[in-house]
């Protein structure tokens, strides 16, 4: 009779064929009557791979972007979640994205830099963790010009100064109240105030400007 090859077995004599080791078992020896259970136990930061047939397999390091937190029999590592990364192999945890970086996908070895660049009249929402943020229009009463700014800076829309207003969203410049029919003494406003008109029994004592109203006195 021919003995069973490694990776195969038979528990009884006089058989014409040998059985293949079942999943989760192996046998490196020839002429065996049983197979051996795979030992999947590996240290943290490692996973077991390759057990079956004639080989016991071995522990391998988790890839970059993955981790395994404890010694156990897991046969795969866990992907780092969004907002985290791992740039080394064999890790038992993941790192948080640092300031001005983000990561919106899982299982990565690095985070992406935040891009705060927005067109004039817009500002960028918060970027970090798992969120890239977006450009959004400046609100009523606010503006933002298109000036250059250094990496990592995230300039927000500013209040319109007194004497100016922003009556619609997304303005790069606040229009000036004309100082003839309109004025505004408060910052961050969406409209101008109407300048006072002296009545027929009054005369002007102080001319209006974009930030002050006309003053009148009785004859």
Image (cartoon, rainbow, N blue to C red):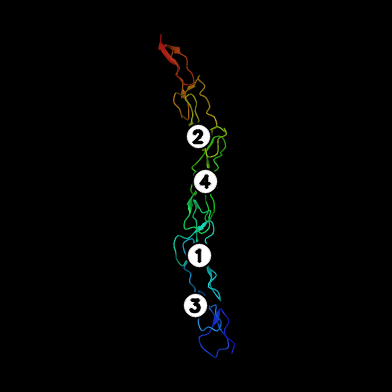
Q: Position of residue 116 (x, y in %)?
A: 54, 40
- Closer to the camera: disc 1 or disc 2? 1
Question: Can residue 132 be seen from the camera position used here?
Answer: no
- Name the residue beneath numbered marker 4: 101
Please name whichever residue, 168 or 39, is drawn nearer the observer in this view of the structure. 39
Residue 36 is marked as 3
- Closer to the camera: disc 2 or disc 3? 3
Residue sitting at the far top: 219
Q: Position of residue 186 (x, y in %)?
A: 44, 26
Local crowd size for mark 1, using a 10 Å CA cut-off: few (<14), some (14–19), many (≥20): many
Q: Position of residue 204 (x, y in %)?
A: 45, 12
Where 64 falls versus 12 (above or below)? above
- Name the residue beneath numbered marker 2: 157
| Secondary structure state at the residue bearing disc 2 | loop
Tell me the residue at 49%/22% (across/down).
182
Q: Position of residue 121 (x, y in %)?
A: 54, 35
Tell me the distance, in whole angstroms, between the alpha carbons under discs 2 and 4.
22 Å
Residue 47 is marked as 1
Where 69 falls versus 51 (above or below)? above
Tell me the distance, in whole angstroms, between the alpha carbons under discs 2 and 3.
68 Å
Marks 3 and 4, the one that precedes in the sequence: 3
Marks 2 and 3, the one that precedes in the sequence: 3
The answer to whether mark 3 and mark 4 are in CB contact below 8 A is: no
Please name whichever residue, 140 or 1, is drawn nearer the observer in this view of the structure. 1
| Secondary structure state at the residue bearing disc 1 | strand
Residue sitting at the far left: 218
Residue sitting at the far bottom: 14
Marks 1 and 3, the one that precedes in the sequence: 3
Tell me the distance, in whole angstroms, between the alpha carbons under discs 1 and 4.
30 Å
The answer to whether mark 2 and mark 3 are in CB contact below 8 A is: no
């Amino acid at each position: 009779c021919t003995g069973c090859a490694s990776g195969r077995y038979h528990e009884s004599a006089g058989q014409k064929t040998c059985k293949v080791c079942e999943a989760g078992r192996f046998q490196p020896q020839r002429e065996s009557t049983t197979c051996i259970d795979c030992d999947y136990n590996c240290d943290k930061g490692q996973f077991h791979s390759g057990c079956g047939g004639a080989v016991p397999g071995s522990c391998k390091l988790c890839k970059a972007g993955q981790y395994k937190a404890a010694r156990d029999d897991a046969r795969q590592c866990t992907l780092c979640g969004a907002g985290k990364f791992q740039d080394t192999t064999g890790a038992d945890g993941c790192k948080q994205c640092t300031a001005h970086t983000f990561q919106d996908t899982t299982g990565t070895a690095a985070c992406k830099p935040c891009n705060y660049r927005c067109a004039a009249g817009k500002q960028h929402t918060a970027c970090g963790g798992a969120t890239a943020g977006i450009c959004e229009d400046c609100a009523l009463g606010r503006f933002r010009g298109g000036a250059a700014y250094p990496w990592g800076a995230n300039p927000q829309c500013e209040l319109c100064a007194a004497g100016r207003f922003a009556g619609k969203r997304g303005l790069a410049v606040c229009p000036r109240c004309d100082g003839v029919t309109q004025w505004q003494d408060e910052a961050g406003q969406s409209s101008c105030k109407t300048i006072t008109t002296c009545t027929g029994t009054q005369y002007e004592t102080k001319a209006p400007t974009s930030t002050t109203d006309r003053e009148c006195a009785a004859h």
